[in-house]
Amino acid sequence: MNAGPWLPVPPAGYGGIENIVATLVPELRRLGVEVVLASVAESTLETDGRVHVFDTGQFAALQRPYNQAVGVVQAHQHAMVRALRDRDDIDLIHDHVEAAGLVTLASLGDSAPPALHTLHWDLHKHPELYGTYDGGDRVRVNGVSADQLSRAPRALRDHSVGHVHLATPLAAEPMPEVTKGSHVVVLGRINPGKGQDLAARLAHTAGFDLILAGPVGPYRNAEELAAAENDPSAALNPDVRFWREKVAPHVDGVRVRWVGMVTGRDRDLLLAGARASLFPLRWAEPGGTAVVESLALGVPVVGIARGCLPELIEEGHSGLLTDDEEALGDLVHKASGIDPRACRAEAERRFTPAVMAESYLRLYEQIRNRI
């Protein structure tokens, strides 16, 4: 299981792919799969073996110039290849490393174990790679939604074995006991694609209380962002520019509040106490982790019908979707008519770690049987 060199598994806070790996591995082991984890040494996830070249997560290296950072992922991949060379008990590789992981798998040759590469991101990011990719019969890919794969270049789709929706441990745990508040939450990194500017504007015009929970670029909270006020690198960060120009003018601390990055129990309580979880998307969200987390906490989802959302939400039962940005405000008010228990039941049926692990186990067997 190749999680990459960027963050430990599980991560201390933010970490989309690392959280998915941390959710998947225990369930695979429960099903009898022995898992060797390729990550960093500070990972605490219990596994049957470890591969690493870095002691700590290298996420900060992504802020360095390309010619200074490019060797990080290659060093990690090289360690994984050495481990494969030195062992004869690996039946399959499950890779989660963007771009470099796919290339490494294809370059190993027919003597290497069969492999599955999970695509967690926007597939338009690497057209030169995905448009020309050829992994033969040994390397297959899967998406995290059908919509994501539908947008893939033909060469990549030819290697697909389907999609597996993301899962959350929250769907298998008791819901926190909270009293529903009047607020609506947008959970996620402050970014143009997430549409926090639209959410903030609608909060004022449609009359609902909004809490924005997520970092602005590398800055986790208002204190960190204020400390970078005169930092030239902050001014160049597109997420910081988006915050300053499009979102911050609407944040008055009353109708619209920004609470920064919220993790763990604090995040769960904030979300569980919301009357709705808002997704004013301006891009085709591929996986929707925050969507399944919302449902698991009994929170109806209101959003733009883009990307994976129509696959994850049962209209009128677990959420309300629209193609019209201006209609979102009305839907927020209508969401109070959706039963939180229906949202929770949907998560228990579709988005538990066990459901995800069983889906991946079927893909593993399918890939091994093709070789």
Image (spheres, rainbow, N blue to C red):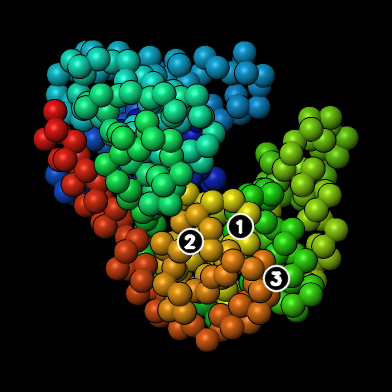
Q: Using a 10 Å C-alpha cutoff, classify the residue at mark 1 as few (fewer than 14 neighbours), some (14 to 19) or many (20 or more).
A: many
User: In the rendered structure, are the residues bearing label 1 and label 2 in contact, judged by CB atoms less than 8 Å apart?
Assistant: yes
The quadrant of the image that shows the N terminus is top left
Q: Which residue is disc 3 drawn over?
A: 326
Asked if residue 244 lies left or right of residue 368, the reply is right
Q: Using a 10 Å C-alpha cutoff, classify the residue at mark 2 as few (fewer than 14 neighbours), some (14 to 19) or many (20 or more).
A: many
> Callout 3: helix, strand or loop?
helix
Q: Give whichever of discs 1 and 3 has the lower sequence position.
A: 1
Q: Which residue is disc 1 drawn over?
A: 281
Q: CA distance from mark 1 to mark 3?
A: 12 Å
Mark closer to the observer (1, 3): 3
Is residue 334 visible in the rendered image? The answer is yes
> Callout 1: helix, strand or loop?
loop
Q: Which residue is disc 2 drawn over?
A: 309
> Which residue is painted at 41% across and 23% down in the image?
132
> Which residue is painted at 32% across and 15% down in the image?
107
Q: Give whichever of discs 1 and 2 has the lower sequence position.
A: 1
Q: Position of residue 202 (x, y in %)?
A: 74, 70
On residue 187, the disc is none
